[in-house]
Image: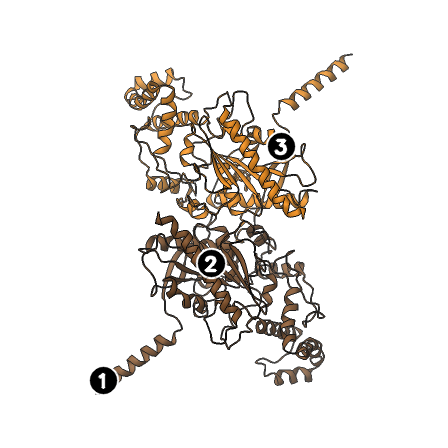
Chain colours: A brown, B orange
Amino acid sequence: MEVTRLLHITLLITLLLYFCQAYNYETYFYKQKVDHFSFADPDTFNLRYLINDDFWDGNGGPIFFYAGNEGDITLFADNTGFMWDIAPEFNALVIFAEHRYYGVSLPYGNDSFTKLKYTGYLTSEQALADYVELITYLKSAIDGAKNSTVVAFGGSYGGMLAAWFRMKYPHVVQGAIASSAPILQFTDITPCEDFGKLVTADFSKESPECANVIRNSWAAIDSVTRNEAGLAWLTQAWSLCKPLKTPQDITSLKNYLVNVWTNLAMVDYPYPANFLAPLPAYPIKACTEMVMPFCYNGVEDFFEPAPWDFKSFAQTCYQTWGVYPRPFMAVHMYGGKDISAASNIVFTNGLLDPWSTGGVLWNVSETVVSLIIPEGAHHLDLRGSNPDDPPSVIQARMIEKTHIQNWIDEYSARYDE
Amino acid sequence: MEVTRLLHITLLITLLLYFCQAYNYETYFYKQKVDHFSFADPDTFNLRYLINDDFWDGNGGPIFFYAGNEGDITLFADNTGFMWDIAPEFNALVIFAEHRYYGVSLPYGNDSFTKLKYTGYLTSEQALADYVELITYLKSAIDGAKNSTVVAFGGSYGGMLAAWFRMKYPHVVQGAIASSAPILQFTDITPCEDFGKLVTADFSKESPECANVIRNSWAAIDSVTRNEAGLAWLTQAWSLCKPLKTPQDITSLKNYLVNVWTNLAMVDYPYPANFLAPLPAYPIKACTEMVMPFCYNGVEDFFEPAPWDFKSFAQTCYQTWGVYPRPFMAVHMYGGKDISAASNIVFTNGLLDPWSTGGVLWNVSETVVSLIIPEGAHHLDLRGSNPDDPPSVIQARMIEKTHIQNWIDEYSARYDE
């Protein structure tokens, strides 16, 4: 009797655990070369990927591939409901690949960030090459996947990767859904002040007074923290974990606030979402190729005035990592604004999302299109469908599905003859 | 009197030297990163390039860019007459860039080939990235070049580079002339025996008897070199520089003959040409990514039977260089046969050229076309025009010019608005 009840409870817990996991997948690892472009470094490491074949048509059904970005891949798997929502309809195999140097995919384990010799392989070019090798392997290893159409998905920096993946490796990826992908947020392409302006506009829309309060807050913080009493008062009033003491503490506090306002604008979803943490204001803070210029003037935006100072930025990078960033690397590699030769990419941009200032907001060609979601925040369209979704995002997802179907039809036609 | 005569003679010699140089160019160097794709190696080196602006329309005229391949770049400049022939007509700036690790463009000087740490950056991906950086720099540095259309040219491995250059960096190169570019001569794409068959066919066409003599020569060499007297006789009869002694000497002799027959088939030009030396049978013998499988059966071809043995090849590479080759690297990187997403490439193939077995021999799309030159040898179309040119090569060059003009018109239209 007791045993039966125990079994019941165990079963219940198992079921609860199963259904509480937002989505279901198995975890694997694939051995990757640390350096895909040269032969000087023979090292390898294990890249994590998640896979689900519940809905898959094992006879050539498509592969939906999430191009992992800066974060633990399980977070992206749990927060990219769109792929899960439409996988059954397309009978798709669902794969999430982790970005090297994130989650557990650390090329040199715990030493990965200890010196440049180890950290230096954290670039988008190497990450894309990881995905090329992984997909090529899976298509040959999984029965029935040989002729499968591969559709890349990605949001934010992952969206940039998805778009670049299609541009650089069209033989591996037949189309890409690039959501809130700021591929134009680079030097000499997008004015550095646009980002801050849009963050401010988001707040002003709700309440112009609110934006003004934030704009005035920087001077107020300076003023109140000029003496010991003020420092103590602010520490207490804002329940800070550590007491404010040095000028560096004040700078950190301000940086924290900049991130808070920015993140709030980015995740201005029409419903509550627990997806704030993994979104840094600057994708891949690595001081290498992702040099995205930001500046604030405090007039058209509500931030403390701060010019974009590449020299000082580069100097800090060198002092911290021993590396000088290459601000034009991504533009030279991927083309910046000149993506006229690309094909089969859907760019989506929520106009509430400050990253949309660096997004592709025009139709490049018949197959490289831009969908605007006026009420959308940071890659809202990639989230699972929700009763509170505005019509614009529902429509965007419909159009994305049409493109995906076209890519599948086009690619499958090769093998139907 | 004597002084005047001396001056005359000096002037004469100077003029002679000037006009004996086939083409006229200035030599420059550009500082390149050894590793364009990571930040672990901060080293740089000087890449040589040649430039001629005699014909250039300095107000946006096009740039003709030769993607240097395995050899001293001056050799390619002197043997690519087609570019020089048509530069005046297009008012083009002519640039020849040297391939890293060749000529004087040695990343680690005389030590470049001493260890893998230095040699490991000899890959096509790195070479293309050199060209990206060079062109981007030149377009910004040369007055009037900012909006210039860039057309890439290349023959053989240089043709592969030209085609891949357009595929990977369409924002840098608006079109490519890829002559005798065996981009399909890789594992699992082109049967390894095709190359040898075509070499044999070239000889059989002239004289079936000749092919048979060569086919029987291998056994004859074995037979005659079985004893000391035979070895001595062959050494003398063929006027060899070093006496034949060991089995390795026999193998070397045979390899030399294989190269001779292959090169003769490749440079089967309709007129004498001094361009044999820089054409190795295997482009970039470096044991890295350019793994091109060749095999001979001695029946359909006239070579000594030799299966393709990747394992032993890889073993030799490891013993010699400490590196295992990656036979699928180029296919994964560039797509192998699947180049359907490419645009603006003209592939030309001479059917006398054994490398045409690995060439693109079909029209991929409206803008990626294949021109067949039945009487053509190895990139005959890239050579300067010659009274003995067959009509097919004259026609091919006409079509190439039409495509180049289209690319220029298309790209220039962006800036005319």
The residue lying at 38 percent from left, 52 percent from top is: A412
- Distance between mark 1 and mark 2 Cα atoms: 55 Å
State the SS at label 1: helix
Callout 3: chain: B
Dot 2 amino acid type: His
Dot 3 amino acid type: Ala
Callout 1: chain: A
Q: Nearer the viewer, mark 1 or mark 3?
A: 3
**Which residue is disc 1 drawn over?**
A3
Residues packed near mark 3 inside 10 Å, few (<14), some (14 to 19) or many (20 plus):
many
Give how far across and how far down residue A120 sits, in percent: 52, 56
State the SS at label 2: helix
Which of these two is toward me, A340 or B219?
A: A340
Q: Nearer the viewer, mark 1 or mark 2?
A: 2
Dot 1 amino acid type: Val
Which numbered marker is on residue B87? 3
Callout 2: chain: A
Give how far across and how far down residue A220 sits, in percent: 70, 79
Residue B309 against residue B82 in the figure, above or below = below
- Distance between mark 1 and mark 3 Cα atoms: 90 Å
Question: In the rendered image, which quarter is residue B308 located in?
Answer: top left
Most extreme residue toward the right, as rendered? B1
